[in-house]
Each structure stands twice: as structure tokens, then as C-alpha cells.
Amino acid sequence: MTTQDEYKTARQIIDFALSKKARDVVLMDLRSISNVADYFICCHGDSDVQVKAISDAIETGMKANGVRLWHKEGVDFFNWVLLDFVNIVVHVFREETRTFYGLERLWGDAKTESFGEDD
């Protein structure tokens, strides 16, 4: 997959998240600072039900687009769901969990792009 294809895939994931009213969606470009993944996507929902809906929409939508989910964690409590698409890792949080772990601060050197309902 080319860098342009990965960015396009990341944008599709963001669109699926926004379709379920994900809040404060951030795309973090890790390519120049780490080899953990090329992109992290962080967002949050206001309830466990919304976190589940966001993560389910992403998983279902990407499967329909032919993108395989390699690993999923956090579906027991829906405070922090991690969806690993290998080069793109998605973190869907409850707001308080997102604030506590502060991934955006931990990866503060990453270039970021923010998305909202109007994008």
C-alpha cells in the first residue's frame, strides 16, 4: 500500500467514525517518528454504547471496503477500543479515558490533522 493509499484509507476510517458522531477526531502521522504504525487515529464517544457504535462502524465499513482488521482490543468494557489495521491503528476512547492516557501528548512530535462533523 502506498502512502497516498494509506492516507485515503485513514480518511475512510475517519468518515466511518464521524458517521457515528465521534468527537475530536485526530489523525496523527507517525511515519517520520516511529515504525509502530504510519498513522494513529484517536477519537472518543460520550458513552460505552457510542464507543461500541463507532468501533463497529469502522470495522464493518472497512471490511466492506476490503481492508482486513488484524487485531482488536477493548471490547469487554468499551473504555478504549483499539482497532489495528497494521499501518493504521485506531483508538476509540471514552472521553475521560482519552484524557487520562493522553496519546496525543505522548506522540506530541507527530504531525496532526483534526476532523469534525463538517469535514
Image (cartoon, grey):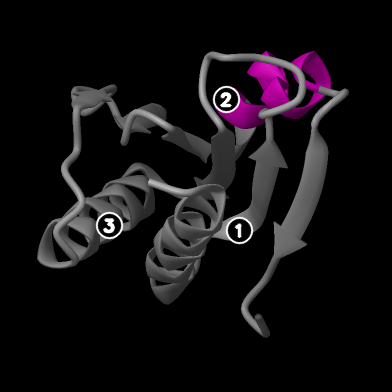
Tag 1's secondary structure? strand
**Mark with earlier residue (1, 2):** 1
Left or right: 105 as drawn, with respect to 93: right
Q: Tell me the magenta residue range.
A: 97-107
Q: Is residue 10 at all visible to an observer of this figure?
A: yes
Measure how far apart labels 1 and 3 are at the Cα level.
13 Å
Is 105 within the magenta?
yes
Give, as a three-letter code, the residue at label 1.
Answer: Arg
Question: What residue is drawn where x is 21% and y is 53%?
Answer: 56
Q: Are marks 2 and 3 in contact (CB under 8 Å)?
A: no
Give, as a three-letter code, the residue at label 2.
Answer: Thr
Tag 3's secondary structure? helix
Q: Is residue 46 at all visible to an observer of this figure?
A: no
Q: Which mark is residue 97?
A: 2
Residue to which mark 3 is pinned: 53
Pick the residue in front: 5 or 81.
5
Left or right: 92 as drawn, with respect to 44: left
Question: What residue is drawn where x is 66% and y is 14%?
Answer: 34
The local crowd at label 1, few if under 14, some if 14 to 19, many if 20 or more residues have their Cα within 10 Å, is: many
- Please identify the residue farthest to the front as the structure is shown: 2
Residue to which mark 1 is pinned: 23
Measure how far apart labels 2 and 3 are at the Cα level.
17 Å
**Mark with earlier residue (1, 3):** 1
Q: Which mark is residue 58?
A: none
What is the chief secondary structure element of the magenta stretch? Answer: helix
Image quadrant holding the C terminus, namely bottom right
The local crowd at label 2, few if under 14, some if 14 to 19, many if 20 or more residues have their Cα within 10 Å, is: few
Q: Against 8, is 71 above or below?
A: above
**Number of numbered labels in the structure image:** 3
The local crowd at label 3, few if under 14, some if 14 to 19, many if 20 or more residues have their Cα within 10 Å, is: some
Question: What residue is drawn where x is 47% and y is 50%?
Answer: 6
